[in-house]
Amino acid sequence: MTDSPTIDSTERPTTVGSADLVPVVVSWRSWLVAALVGLGLSLIFWWPLYSGGGLLGGDIYTYFFPQKAYLSERLAAGEVPLWNNRVGHGYPVVGESQTGLFYPFHLLYAVLDVSSAYNAVQLGHYLLAFLFTWRFARQLGLGDVAGWLAGLVYVYGWFPPRIVLEWAILGGTWLPAALWVAERFLLRPRCRDLAMLAVILAVQMLAGHFHLAFITQLVLALHVPARLWFARRGLPERSTATRRRLLVASGVTLGLSFGLAAVQLLPTWELKQSSQRENVTGRKYDPGYGHMPFGYWSQVVTPWRWYEAGTDRVSQYDAGPANTNQVEAHLYFGLPTVGLLLVGLLGWCVGRRTDSRAVLWLVLGLLALLYTPAWHLDVTRHLPGFGFFTGPGRYSIVTALAAAVLAGVAWQWLMARPLLVRRGGLGLLLAAVFFPLLTWDLWQVGRAQTYAVFLETSLIDRVDQSPVAGRLKQIQGRDGRPVRLFCDYQNLPTLMGVASTPVYLGLGPAEYFDESLVMPGPLPFGVDATPEQVGWLQRAGVTHLLSRRPLNASAWSARLVQTTTDGAFLQMAYEGGREPLDFFLYELRDSRGRLAWLDGGDEAGRSARITDYTANRVTARVESSSGGRLVLTDLDYPGWEVHVDGRAVEPIRIEK
């Protein structure tokens, strides 16, 4: 008799109503072997990171590394940074969220150098994501090998092209973890599983990357009731009889997770109310940004049509009203996986036996896929969550997990065919061909589709070799005045220990985007600045200019400080080391700097000098015989307090 693909439940009765259902028990040996398999895969895919190298490309050095470098520096100094005073005129670290100040894994930044910590966090999450996916598959009744396959397809199909986006693996790790614990709770309701689920969901939100957390919660909101009412295979009678109670308990657990993550969520909500996301529009902030065009679905079965290293074909595609790119729109399982799924489909057509859990994951995967082209945004943009987060293509993470689960189901069914059972060597031969072929396929696509470039030495480890960084350090040490740099590489100069503008922030204070407050545009990169722009720089406390070409010193009201090459750091950051570049460092005349008298420079009988400037405190020594008003050219944000001679005073907001 020929069976169709179904999830094996040999470790427990599968009939609804069984009173003696035994929960899935996974031995420590299985955990150990799965960990070794996961470690081996991460070594194959990310050996350059294990060997001390680093990544360059995408948002790594415009966004993620500047945050983590500042976090590492302040933790090493014994300070928990609530304010980042390097990016622009500052922003709230917790509110902006993606620094992940309270994320447990980021404690590594307190004990390791920033490059090692960044690599360790990334690599550790790849291992955890594999283990959680394997364990979820085992909870569904799949065997170890089928679980390894599910982990390989999910983790190394969806994430490697997104290595330039820290949020991907940090958020995506917890989706299978939450599903595993939720499934275990439905099988054998226990309070400890609910507590574990609440912690998992809270930890995912503490990472500060909320979109995948939202998707995880959405999947649970669909998965749990669907399991209790429709896909009940494998559930005991006591679970189906008390399904309303279990559903309520699951909802309460979700609410509890928000309470546990409130230390991160509340500051972010505060910033959101006064951020650019409340009133700034455009293709970049359109909820459809990062969608997967319908025609790009064919990447799953015709990768040769789309994938080519160094070429972003989807950006050249007619993407519609919002922009997208090959990383946000990526979805690939591997051609061997597609072939296996077709074999499983054939088996179902012949056997006509259906496992409702497999059907549930087929439906969830298809629903997520249907959302990726952003067809429904006319409606969903008005719904909480859907209208705030960009990147409809990110919902394909659910499709990737569904494909992983179904691939595991198909593999287990295939290995149970009588021919392969009678001739065990044939099954081993099939596995020996299939798994290396799939791994190679996913490795090739991961390298072709990412924006990342591997460096033998991490870029941040080269800062000490930078003559520009050395000169800026001398200037700050000599003058005792914090430097604020105007530079066309957003946020990168902060790695040299100075503040830098303009900024790149995912969720930023609205002042950085208010046309009445920002520099009159367009930004003068490669052209002479207008008098209005120079005046803005002086009032904004910009002290120095960094340019890749000589400036008209008269037009810019600037003095040349240094002309140099910077092959180790800046040249590598700008051009990947391909072309030699000159860098020109200028001092801006008549700048307020970080601290200045509002009505002009120092006069006889008064002075103002910053003596201590850390993440959470600015201390200045001020002397004046006639009084006056001081301007600190940092962003005025709720929470700052001003004290003069130990007495609290009311600050005054200066917008010009």
Image (cartoon, helix red, strand yellow):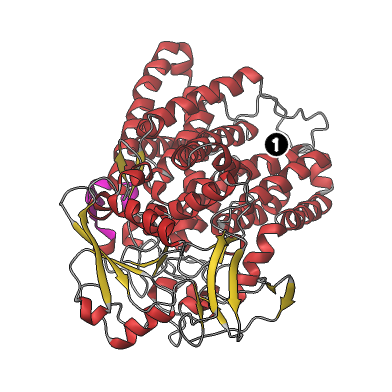
Judge whether 530 appears above or below 175 on screen: below
Is disc 1 surrounded by few (<14), some (14 to 19) or many (20+) residues within 10 Å? many
- Look at the image and give the residue range highlighted in magenta: 299-314
Please name the residue that numbered disc 1 is placed on.
234
- Tell me, yes or no, if residue 2 can be seen here: no
Pick whichever, 17 or 258, lies toward us. 258
The image quarter containing residue 494 is bottom left
Judge whether 105 appears above or below 225 on screen: above
Q: Position of residue 472 (x, y in %)?
A: 36, 57
Pick whichever, 581 or 352, lies toward us. 581
Query: Given the current orientation, which residue lies at the most extreme left position?
Result: 579
Q: Is residue 316 left or right of residue 421?
A: left
The image quarter containing residue 636 is bottom right
What is the count of numbered marks?
1
- Tell me, yes or no, if residue 209 can be seen here: yes
Q: Position of residue 349 (x, y in %)?
A: 46, 40
Q: Is residue 496 left or right of residue 94?
A: left
Q: Position of residue 286 (x, y in %)?
A: 44, 73
